[in-house]
Image: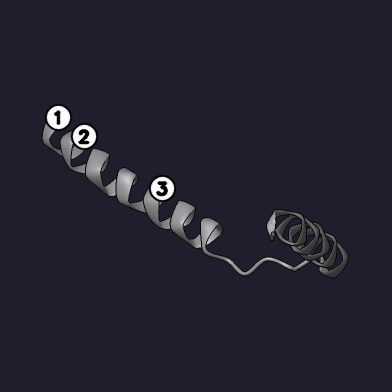
Amino acid sequence: MTVLTWLLIPLGTGVVASVWGWFAGRPRRADVWTDVDRYDRLRAALARTES
């Protein structure tokens, strides 16, 4: 029985890693207005640093 326990540890780790990888790699919905605001702030910051 202890051998089965030692074999279940890597199996469980693999399952958890697979679920985490699937969850972390899923496509996320982009918030367009937040992206536009970030772009505007970046453009303003770059415009200020130019001589």
- List x then y, in percent, for residue 19: 47, 55
- The residue at 83%/67% (across/down) is 36
Which corner quadrant holds the N terminus?
Answer: top left
Q: Which circle's residue, 3 or 2, is located before the other in the chain?
A: 2
Q: Which residue matches tag 3?
A: 16
**Type of the residue with mark 1:** Thr
Whether pointer 3 and pointer 1 mark residues with C-beta atoms closer than 8 Å, the reply is: no
Observer-nearest of 21 and 3: 21
Residue drawn where x is 32% and y is 44% of the image: 13
Neighbourhood count class around disc 2 (C-alpha, 10 Å): few under 14, some 14–19, many 20 upward: few
From mark 1 to mark 2, how far is it between C-alphas?
5 Å
Q: Secondary structure at mark 2?
A: helix
The kind of secondary structure element at disc 1 is helix
**Residue denoted by label 1:** 2
User: At label 2, which amino acid type do we have?
Assistant: Thr
Q: Amino acid at mark 3?
A: Val
**Which quadrant holds residue 42?**
bottom right
Which element is circle 3 on?
Answer: helix
Q: Foreground residue, 37 or 49?
A: 49
Q: Position of residue 37 (x, y in %)?
A: 85, 61
Q: Tell me the CA gap for discs 3 and 2.
A: 16 Å
In terms of image quadrants, where is residue 34?
A: bottom right
The reply to whether callout 1 and callout 2 are in contact (CB within 8 Å) is: yes
Tell me which residue sits at (88%, 66%) in the image: 33
In primary-sequence order, the first of circles 3 and 1 is 1
- Which residue corresponds to mark 2? 5
